[in-house]
Image (spheres, rainbow, N blue to C red):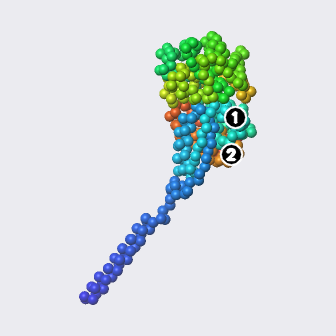
Amino acid sequence: MRRLLALIMLGLLILGVIASGCIGGSEVKDTGTSKKSSPASSVAQTELKKATLKIFHAGSLSEPLKDVSEAFKEYAKEKLGYDVEIQAEASGSVMAVRKVTDLHKTADIVAVADYTLIPQLLVPNYTDFYVLFATNEIVIAFTDKSKYADEINSDNWYEILARPDVKFGFSDPNQDPCGYRSVMVMKLADLYYGKPIFETLVEKNTNIYAEGNHVIAPKEIQVESNKVVMRPKETDLTGLVESGSLDYYFIYKSVAMQHHLKFIELPKEINLKDFTLADYYGQVSITLGSTGKTIKAKPIVYGVTVLKDDPNRELALQYLRFMLSEKGKEIFAENYQDFIWPPVAFGNVPDEIKDEVKVEG
């Protein structure tokens, strides 16, 4: 009997050890490396590929594109497996295009404040598509330091700017759309107010002149008084206004808001914001000495493209796709710039961005 009990106990002990071994083996298997890694962790575990993107862009896009680029760099690391350096070069939009066409500089992306510069100057030799993605309007910005800051308003702005002790500025029409738009705004003001505002503010202080409603900007623009200050791009004037060296300047509303400047809004008949007034704006045009092109006044619309034969084209299109997405729209809104939704694309639109845009033509 004792022998039988001993055998039974020994058997139970062996079964317990076996069971314990099976349970332990099961636990090790469940916590082992056989689990599948997520795509994000797989990218993180893979060595990132290094790449550089170069963007030529309008000065007024500096702030939103800085934020878009920072967000894209994180996205590229997590989702695309790239460590991206982004070299963003701001200038007037005309100059941004001429860097490609005249100076033959290399870039991946060109983003301009006047979309028509792309079909006029870059298509078909340098690109075959473009996207309209943002809008803006012209305002007159200033600070508390500006002379007559407590008097200027949307009705008397041209009288304030004409006062002998007031200095105002706009960017170079030959290099920057904000410049030629500012000049055309002053010509449209002639029509709206029925007064010689263009002659008083522009012709008396520069060699820019008008023949009827058509403005001529000579290739070499000369400022002929100390009343007017001109710089290559609109954002070059911001610091002068902030410091009090310049009283007022014509600028995009988004830039004025980004820099927390005071500004007056101009009547919709002259601010180049209202799409229903496109025909009214089109009464005024300007010929640029820098390009020989004639541009009609029209609502402000920004454009962007990726250049042909770009060695980084795949990554550049991923950047463009990101910029045109809901995230890009959100970033532009944070920078006080109105986004076209959905963005509108023309030409041979790449498949990579088709689900982010409305294709037209």
> Is the residue 192 above or below the residue 250 in the image?
above
Is residue 40 visible from the viewing direction of this image?
A: yes
How far apart marks 2 and 1 lie (CA) works out to 17 Å
Q: Nearer the viewer, residue 67 or 103?
A: 103
Q: Residue at x 49, y 27 (%)?
A: 260
Where residue 58 appears, as percent x and y from the top left, is 61, 33
Task: Please give the name of the residue rendered at 34% of the width and 76% of the height, measured from the top-left corner.
Answer: 16
Instruction: Name the disc covering residue 164, or none.
Output: none
Residue 210 lies, in percent from the top left, at 70, 17
Q: Quadrant of the C terminus?
A: top right
Earlier-in-chain disc, 2 versus 1? 1
Residue 134 in picture, x, y percent from top left: 59, 32
Question: Residue 307: x and y, percent?
Answer: 68, 41
The answer to whether residue 360 shows anywhere in this view is no
On the image, numbered disc 1 is attached to which residue?
98
Decide: is 58 above or below 157: below
Q: Residue at 44% of width from left, 68% of height from top?
A: 29
Q: Which quadrant would the N terminus be assigned to in this image? A: bottom left
Query: In terms of secondary structure, where does tag 1 sit?
Result: helix
Position above or below: 73 against 174: below
Which residue type carries mark 1?
Arg
Identify the residue at image location x=67%, y=32%: 95
